[in-house]
Image (cartoon, rainbow, N blue to C red):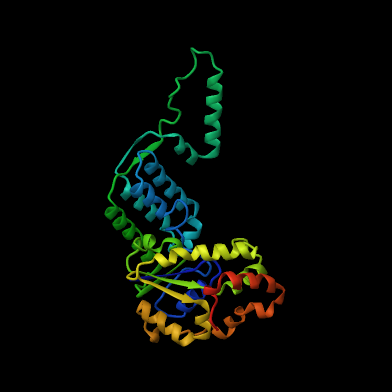
Amino acid sequence: MNVITCIGFHGTGSGAVDDLLKEFDNCPSAKKGVECRFLQDPDGISDLEYNLIDNPHRLNSGFALKRYLRFAKAHERTYKKIFGDKWLEYSRDYIDSLISDRYLGYWHCDLLLLNPLIRLFYYFRRAVNKVMPRKLKKPRYYNYFPNIEYFHSYISREEFIEKTQNYCERLCYLLNPNDCKFVLLDQCVATSNIPRYISYIKNLKVIVVDRDPRDLYINQSLNGQHVLPKDPKIFARVYKDQRKMMRRIPTDLHVLQLKYEDLIYNYDDTVKQIMEFIGQDANHHIRKKQLFNPEVAIKNTKLWERFPQYSEEIKVIEATLKEFLYKY
């Protein structure tokens, strides 16, 4: 099974490649719009690797394991749409495989994971204890939570990667019950550090899609998006900074970089390039142009010609991001 993920820089067109790949009959995926971000999101797999491998700590490591369980439970509704009802079960199995020992105990950060009402009652008891007569006061290190379990983990990076790959493979098989050749996961890795994320999934290939900054700026302004800045000078700096990490990708990684505009203006060649990259057969392209139609998508290009009210902002972007402008 080969896993494919299409990623971008927010609004740069990776969804177009997702739609294209869904036109093939051997590439199952989640419902449209459901992003699979458990590797890269805060408290996700990458944070877990940092706290268990890059910076193992007698307190932080156990806390990180609990935080991933909290993450898995908090986002269960989303990931059930991708992997089905076993998402939480497999996530618990994964964390269990990373735990070396368990024992009763906690530190103050563990309390942050408790139910807010329980924490409030804990603070109330401590406040009352401070005003109690000395003979009735509990000692400073009194154990208010004797049943909290502490996790200890000590594993090598190789063990962590192996266990993580097994976990991701189990999840992918849930999405692929018919044992198709490919599985498509949307936004599974981050553009900021692809070499780190790509090791978590076996046979993972990454397609990175970028877009002309002029269209990106106007599109996000028209749609009222709130992720990218509205000031064109700040927008240009953010745009450029986000792409600096891409220059550090080793050439031997399975990463294909595309321009959104090429998928429209050079459709046949770009589709062929994508199929060669992932090892796809054109015979499986049974719904050609039904989900991604370049004749429709072309309306989302050269927006500055249709919306002259952004001419001043576009001048700033053209002056500061010359190397990123699409060559029509």
Judging depth in this view, the residue of 222 and 119 nearest the camera is: 222
Q: Quadrant of the C terminus?
A: bottom right
Q: Quadrant of the N terminus?
A: bottom left
Q: Along the horizontal axis of the image, is 123 left or right of 97?
A: right
Q: Is residue 140 visible?
A: yes
Rendered residue at 54%/20% (across/down)? 130
State which quadrant residue 59 falls in. Answer: top left
Q: Position of residue 149 (x, y in %)?
A: 38, 37
Q: Along the horizontal axis of the image, is 224 left or right of 282?
A: right
Q: Is residue 211 visible?
A: no
State which quadrant residue 10 falls in. Answer: bottom right
Q: Is residue 104 above or below residue 317?
A: above
State which quadrant residue 282 falls in. Answer: bottom left
Rendered residue at 50%/81% (across/down)? 262
Q: Position of residue 323 (x, y in %)?
A: 52, 74
Q: Along the horizontal axis of the image, is 245 left or right of 322?
A: left
How many marks on residues? 0
State the residue lying farthest toward the front: 319
Q: Position of residue 292 (x, y in %)?
A: 52, 80
Q: Position of residue 179 (x, y in %)?
A: 34, 72
